[in-house]
Image (cartoon, rainbow, N blue to C red):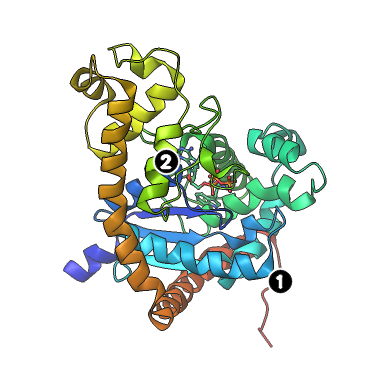
Amino acid sequence: MSEVKKDKKPILLSGIQPSGHLALGNYVGAMRNWVNLQQDYLGIFMVVDMHAITVRQKPAHLRNRCLSFAAQYLAAGIDPSKNVIFMQSHVPQHAELAWVLNCYTYMGELNRMTQFKDKSKRHEDNINAGLYAYPALMAADILLYQTDLVPVGADQKQHLELTRDIANRFNNTYSPTFKVPEPFIPKAGARIMSLQEPDKKMSKSDANENNYISLLDPPDVLRRKIKRAVTDSAREITPESPNSSGIGNLITIYSVLNDTSVDAVAQQFAGQQYSNFKGELADSLVAFLEPFQDRYNKVIGEKGYLTGILDEGANRARYMATKTLSKVYRKIGFVPAGRS
Ligand code: ATP
Ligand code: LTN
């Protein structure tokens, strides 16, 4: 009886592109919720390497980063015995369903995607078709597994809405085929801002590494980055500080790390110098990241253990994905293969 129940857990799915260095924004906006929600869901967590090549990557760096990101998923607390963890490119059904979904996605929809517009500006010399069609691949990632919930940061809301539209369009054209997924965007920390340019989001592949906190930054680097983080010209924390972009962002980070609200933090530090508060924030960060980095170092030192988890994850994922893809092929009228 309990076995049956276990299999029926709803599906939680998310992924991160192996570009740059996994950053505090990724942890707070996404990974933290993967960890918190894993008890109640069957978690499917991918390193989305096929998405990452929409921007040029150096092959050796990409290879190392893919393993490093998977190890960081484990270090963050994703339990590999309860969840499915794998490399997107190990499951060919993602590319196969993406092609189909491309044919159910309008150019007018893709033209509106802000991530495409932002990345086109950042990579003017390489505005490729993959970057443009990226949302259809993301929709495939999600819809292949009949996903219930997708925990992501606020920047992914638009892609999730498009995924839902594509799912509904397909379901209405044929018959119910895909579960229509819900986004899970946290109330606090859905958009952690850059440390030096607090009006733009913290991005893990920012050219300026002072703009982000890498989850693998050593303590002295963490302290230096926080110390240098841009604030406004006031000196002391007040109840209004959460509304000021630079210091407000630091308060948000502190509140998330200490599991409290931004207003409570502003009250706790009211009247204190920014420099004092930054010192406390740096202490919190170091205390949080040191054990994370210890766990990471153990996992990354055992390559066989990590690749074993990824192989098993890919096997399970292929099994689940094949079911949905076969259904899709049948509904659109493809002749079944291997019937002779
Ligand atoms: P890149 O700069 O390499 O394009 P990124 O930092 O924007 O990457 P993604 O791989 O696009 O990261 O996103 C991974 C997850 O982290 C997504 O769920 C995304 O919403 C979340 N995320 C990214 N940046 C932030 C941020 N600054 N605050 C909160 N969540 C974020
Ligand atoms: N597009 C996302 C990464 C991503 C993703 C997914 C997130 C690819 N496939 C499936 C959730 C579910 C990004 O750029 N952050």
Query: In the figure, 197 relative to 81: above or below?
Result: above
Split into 4 quadrants, where in the image is the N terminus?
bottom left
Q: Is residue 17 visible?
A: yes
Q: Nearer the viewer, residue 109 or 327?
A: 109
Could you say which disc has been placed on residue 176 in the image?
none
| Mark 2 neighbour density, 10 Å: few (under 14) some (14–19) many (20 or more) | few
Query: Residue 270: where, in percent of width, then height?
Result: 23, 16
Q: Name the quadrant containing residue 239.
A: top left
Q: Residue at x 33, y 54 (%)?
A: 10
Q: Nearer the viewer, residue 90 or 127?
A: 127
Q: Is residue 133 found left or right of 257 in the rendered image?
A: right
Q: Is residue 195 found left or right of 309 in the rendered image?
A: right
Query: Mark 2 falls on what kind of element?
Result: helix
Q: Who comes first in sequence, dot 1 or dot 2?
A: 2
Query: In the figure, 62 relative to 125: above or below?
Result: below
Query: Residue 324: where, in percent of width, then height?
Result: 53, 63
Q: Residue at x 74, y 36 (%)?
A: 121
Q: Marks 1 and 2, how far apart in space?
A: 61 Å
- The amino acid type, in three-letter code, at marker 2 is Arg
Query: Residue 338: where, in percent of width, then height?
Result: 66, 83
Q: Nearer the viewer, residue 292 or 260?
A: 292
Pointer 2: what residue?
A: 224
Could you say which disc has been placed on residue 335 in the image?
1
Query: In the figure, 72 relative to 26: above or below?
Result: below
Q: Name the quadrant containing residue 85.
A: bottom left
Q: Is residue 302 found left or right of 89 in the rendered image?
A: left
Residue extending farthest to the bottom is 340
Query: In the figure, 18 relative to 335: above or below?
Result: above
Q: Residue at x 37, y 42 (%)?
A: 223
Q: Is residue 187 visible?
A: no
Q: Are marks 1 and 2 in contact (CB under 8 Å)?
A: no
